[in-house]
Amino acid sequence: MFLGTHTPKLDDKGRVILPAKFREDLADGVVLTRGQERCLYVFSRATFGDVLEKLRTASLTSKTAREYQRFFLSGVSEEEPDKQGRVTVPAVLRQYAGLDRELTVIGSGDRAEIWSTPAWNSYYAEKEDAFANTDEEVIPGLF
């Protein structure tokens, strides 16, 4: 499970050190791909297999589903963490997410997300008040 907020740096070779708390779940390999709001999604191989199964259930006659699958899956990069827990973030994904040296990695339950720190700070500032003042059930049965 991926939880919390971490601030690793992107090195000159395009590698990021995964938070130590995430490494056990990602020891068998990492799957990176494009996420919403211009972040990157980080899945374990097992969890990504579950995501693929869900994508396979989408209707082939839905243009929106086909377009989503193409964009989501064409960005997939399978990576192996090295002994220091670093993974390479391919240039195409770094460009998509606007990643520079300063990164914010957040846990989102079954996945982690990699954000450029300025993008995360902007997103957080924009959404914080709405989150704090939510007065309706967003996720059924949670509260």
Image (spheres, rainbow, N blue to C red):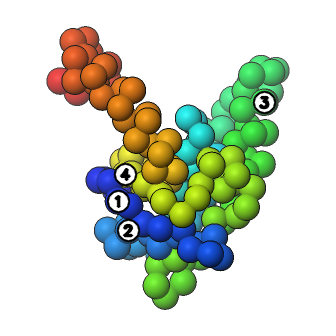
Q: CA distance from mark 3 to mark 2?
A: 32 Å
List x then y, in percent, for residue 43.
52, 56
In contact (CB < 8 Å): disc 4 and disc 1:
no
Give the crowd class for mark 4: few <14, some 14-19, many >=20 residues within 10 Å: some
Can see residue 119? yes
Q: Earlier in the sequence, mark 4 or mark 1?
A: 1
Amino acid type indicated by mark 1 = His
List x then y, in percent, for residue 129.
27, 22
Q: Earlier in the sequence, mark 3 or mark 2?
A: 2
In contact (CB < 8 Å): disc 4 and disc 2:
no
Residue under label 4: 107
Secondary element at tag 4? strand
**Which callout, 1 or 3, points to the residue nearer the camera?**
1
Residue under label 3: 67
Q: Which mark identifies residue 19? A: 2
Q: Earlier in the sequence, mark 4 or mark 3?
A: 3
Q: Residue at x 39, y 46 (%)?
A: 108
